[in-house]
Image (cartoon, rainbow, N blue to C red):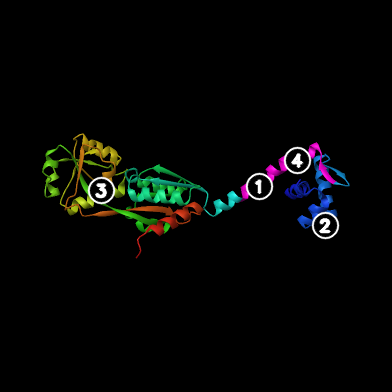
Amino acid sequence: MELRHLRYFLGVVEHGSVAEAARRLHIAQPALSRQIKDLEEELDAVLFERSVRGTTLTAAGQQLAVDARRIVADLLGTRQRVARVAEGLEGNLRMGITPNFGWHPKILGSLRRFHQAEPEIAMSLEPGLSARQLERIREGELDAGFLAWRYPPNDQFLAREFGEIQVFECRLKLALPRDSRLACQVPAHLSALRDEPAIWFPTEVAPGYDQFLNYQCQTANLVPRKAQLASDVLSILGLVAAGVGYAIVSDVSAYTCPEGVVLVDHPELTMRHPVSFVYRNDNSNPTLKRYIAHLERMQPAG
């Protein structure tokens, strides 16, 4: 039994006779009669009662009509869904995000507008630091990710493997316990913090970020006394709020900063770093291509 048998059968059901169905289906009447006969032989059941007034369904034919309509409708739905997925109108988009970037209005606004434009695309966001995101994007576990794009000396190599769209740029801020003497009188020079306990990322957790912060400290003549380590920004800010020490964090921390922390702009914190949407250049997921186009449309002109 093939799909064409069901279509011919339903044509006869709809038009009430083989002759009328043959005319509407643009097939010779003897050929259509043969197709119906083949279907009856395949199912070992008589499907129509034939008379001078036309054809009527037998009990077996009535059941087949119910099932055939469902099968044809399911196939049509499948074709439409496959076409929509192929065009990126439906499907899944798996993205990573560095945890402290999740509340940034540019990312939230981008996701909101994309969902409004493409409501049939299911988006999933999975938190992870940049190095881990890159591994998962490379392995195909994620389609893309929002991450800090600083991994010397491998940037040139990675740039060939990955595509990047810069979403926004971060500045650095000094995170101080709100009730501390440092918050009451912020030192004019960062070098004055050399004896203060600093809360830092472990080098192995975020090697690029560690290099970036160390270089910023060098330009400000500060050798930080790394007294405490924490593997994510929220933990670092929590230790600052507890009065354990100070930290240097991205200005995006303002969106998740605890009550007990004050974020200070300091004139010697001059370096900036981009936050980018990163993906493998050879990723063929149509939903990813749609989101890339969406981000590119959001980029400022020029």
Q: Amino acid at mark 1?
A: Leu
Q: Is residue 146 left or right of residue 80?
A: left
Within-10-Å neighbours for mark 2: few <14, some 14–19, many 20+: few
Which comes before the other along the chain, label 3 or label 2?
2
Queried whether the magenta region covers residue 76, the answer comes back as yes
Which comes before the other along the chain, label 3 or label 4?
4
Q: Amino acid at mark 2?
A: Ala
**Residue 229 in sight here:** no
Closest to the observer, 111 or 269: 111
Real-space CA distance between mark 1 and mark 3, rounded to the nearest whole angstrom:
52 Å
Query: How many tags in the picture?
Result: 4
Give the position of the C terminus as an image quadrant: bottom left
Say the numbered circle drawn on residue 64. Answer: 4
Q: Using the rendered view, name the quadrant where residue 67 is placed.
A: top right
Closest to the observer, 53 or 179: 53
Q: Nearer the viewer, mark 4 or mark 1?
A: 4
Which region shows up in magenta? 54-79
Q: Where does the image place residue 204, in percent across and percent down from the top left?
A: 31, 43
Which comes before the other along the chain, label 4 or label 1?
4
Queried whether the magenta region covers residue 101, the answer comes back as no
Q: Is residue 25 above or below residue 62?
A: below
Q: Where does the image place residue 233, in percent across and percent down from the top left?
A: 28, 41
Within-10-Å neighbours for mark 4: few <14, some 14–19, many 20+: some
Q: Which residue is mark 1?
A: 75
The chief SS type of the magenta part is helix
Residue furthest bottom in the image: 302
Q: Secondary structure at mark 4?
A: helix
Say the numbered circle drawn on residue 28. Answer: 2
Real-space CA distance between mark 2 and mark 4, rounded to the nearest whole angstrom:
23 Å
Say the numbered circle drawn on residue 251. Answer: 3
Real-space CA distance between mark 3 and mark 4, rounded to the nearest whole angstrom:
66 Å
